[in-house]
Image (spheres, helix red, strand yellow):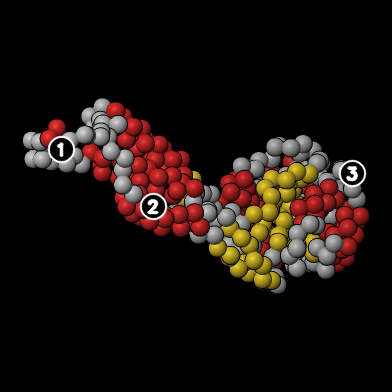
Amino acid sequence: MAFNHPYFLFLLLLLPVLAWLKGRRAAQPAFLYSSLKLVEGLTSVRRSRAGGFLAALRWLALALLIVALAQPRLSKSTMEVKASGIDIVCALDLSGSMYTEDYNINGQGISRFHIAQAVLRKFIEGRPDDRIGLVVFAARAFIAAPLTLDHDFLLANLDRLEIGTINSDATAIGDGIVTALNRLRNLKAKSKIIVLMTDGGNNSGNIDPMTAAEAAKALGVKVYTVGLGNAELVREMGLPPGYLPDTDTLQKISDMTGGKFYRANNAEELTAIYKDIDKLEKTQAVINKYTQYRQLFAWFISGGLALLMVEAALGQTLLRRLP
């Protein structure tokens, strides 16, 4: 338990002094007698301790009220956590072509979306000290999770993603980059990157990918691009060229921003790509973690008032005294 205003506790030191001064001061007599003969026979009567008990209740109530002034509260310590990492926004393509099952794990076909989701999960779990955010895009771009150190929250949002959550008939790469930039531009971290995964070319959105890349360069944000899709299987399936990434544009985006372009033709290559990205430079950042306080002063106020009420009630009933 801690106190928000601990200096009020010094008032507790005055209570014994006040009690001693009150005891030294003679109380006013309840009755005045013209002769001691009127009280003969009362000398054997014991002095009542009711007054001392009631006074103790009053002093205790006052002590509780003073403690309430100090605002006691339960809390955990606030710590400065030094996190070694960088600020990362992962931009994931949610267009319909991401459901193409041209990846293979243990002889079983798996879609581009699900392999990207699984590899991204491992990447996040491997960087617990980095603030990571999540942006998704198809015909439009949206923030799926803000930059956070709460990776359980981040992973829960990643697991909830599905193709079709947003309009999935197109791919807005430029909008995806700019949406990620909006999460990074006001942050003070020295190292800020975007990891963008897509399996197609830009054919939607309001911002051209190269314009978005110029903005990233101006803000000092590196963009690492990952092209998804197995070119050989796409040809065997007879799918149109739009089912493969625009490698030229992705390469230019990375080159302009100081990042790197990767081409993932299979699950093994995609896993290796994220292992390579995981070796990125790290910087020191201080993040404050705050905890909520549970205020307790109401309990002390209630206790003090309750004791005052008990003292007043007993003083008028069971322990009633002469005025």
Image-quadrant location for residue 80: bottom right
Residue matched to label 2 = 18
Residue matched to label 3 = 206
Confirm whether residue 129 shows in the render: yes
Residue at the spot x=74%, y=37% of the render? 166
Q: Secondary structure at mark 1?
A: helix
Confirm whether residue 314 shows in the render: no
Give the camera-side residue of 2 and 166: 2
Q: Amino acid at mark 1?
A: Leu
Disc nearest the viewer among 2 and 3 = 2
Residue at the spot x=22%, y=34% of the render? 33
Give the camera-side residue of 128 and 317: 317
Question: Marks 2 and 1, Cα distance to the nearest angstrom?
Answer: 34 Å
Q: Quadrant of the image for the N terminus?
A: bottom left
Residue at the spot x=72%, y=56% of the render? 89
Residue at the spot x=69%, y=40% of the render? 163
Residue matched to label 1 = 36
Count neighbours of disc 3 (C-alpha within 10 A) and say few if under 14, some if 14 to 19, many if 20 or more.
Answer: few
Count neighbours of disc 1 (C-alpha within 10 A) and say few if under 14, some if 14 to 19, many if 20 or more.
Answer: few
Examine the rendered structure and indicate whether residue 251 appears above or below residue 24: below
The residue most toward the front is 34
- Indicate which disc, 2 or 1, sits on the residue closer to the N terminus: 2
